[in-house]
Image (cartoon, rainbow, N blue to C red):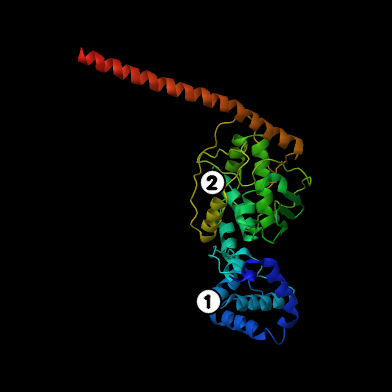
Amino acid sequence: MVATETDPPTTDRQSAASEGDAGGGRYAAEWRLFVDWCATTGHTGLPGDTATVHAFLVACPAAPATQRRRLTAIDHHHRAAGHPPPSRHDAIRDLVRGRPARPVRRPLDPAAVDTALRRLPASGWTRGWFGRRDRLLLVLAAADIPYRHLAQLTGADITISRGAATITTPAGDVQLAATEQAWVCPACAVTAWMDLLYLEATRGTRQVAQVLHDADPLYFGAPHNCFSPRPPDWTGDGVPLLPPIDQHGWTPLDRPAGLSRQSISRLARQAAAGDDQPHRDIPPPVSGQRPIEFTDDVLAPTLTYDIQQWQHGIHQRHAAREQLAHLGDALDDMDTRIAELEARTKQLLEQGRRV
Ligand SMILES: [Zn+2]
């Protein structure tokens, strides 16, 4: 066992020490090999992504020292061209060190994401509720935010300013700016979902259902939702940004955990591939409240965005859940008692038959 294979600082020092040579003489052969491999396999070498570099190393096996020289050359040429070095990834380090390979996340195809955003529904109950969540999930996955980070995001990690949304992730801030068409606009995917999440937290699922039932489908030339004025800090803490939704549209916002990393990954890939599960369009549940009015086709609600209301709504959800937890215990006790009584009745009947 060579010490440097399991010792990242030594590897980094070696890389740094030899970078001066990477562009010209010493590592020119390594860079040329990578460029040739990309050209013959149809990959883009500059900028190349992590998956491309990983595939290159797998396709051209070599001793760890050789693989490290190749990575030094690839990173050097990326830095020189103003691109981030693509080899800084656990999977690539594992490969070079001879550890079992972990799967590398392939970036979603931008054209497939675009097509999915035109197709995913934004109206109808429960269809639009799932659709709007999955539109957000898709644009976040397309922005290359790791799925494990997406699973941890809460409403408070979103900051919205006119025409842009900022997502604060453990790896840093990610900006999603408005694009020309509203129905494929990533910033609109964020704001349209945040509006609904706010409505869900403060007014409840019945209002969300009514709003989605009344909303028009998205269409080419629809107005942007992401330019509607909102205070910068109105989003509530403690709400999972991507919560699970059940078949009736109910959403457990009172639980701290949202969708799992695996579910987010699966939903994003299914949506991009066009084989996501269709959801129903059914009448919304009856509500005694006055319906919320919306000023345009993309849900720019005439709501007063208020962090206090958001927090209050979530607090109420938590309180209700605690109360229901006691009810759950009582129901469990009742189930046990009924089972006991049934067993006793059966016993008595059998005794009666024998007599
Ligand atoms: Zn927009």
Who's the residue at 66% across and 39% down the image? 199
Who's the residue at 52% across and 25% down the image? 329
Can residue 254 be seen here? Answer: yes
Judge left or right: residue 163 versus residue 67. Answer: right
Q: Nearer the viewer, residue 145 or 86?
A: 86
- Residue 317's disc number: none
Residue 37 lies in what quarter of the image?
bottom right
Judge left or right: residue 135 versus residue 166. Answer: left
Identify residue type, mark 2: Arg
Number of numbered discs overlaid on the protein picture: 2
Residue 174 place in picture, x, y as percent: 71, 57
Mark 1, residue position: 59
Mark 2, residue position: 127
Rendered position, 108 above or below 32: above
Residue 240 place in picture, x, y as percent: 64, 44
- Tag in front: 1 or 2: 1
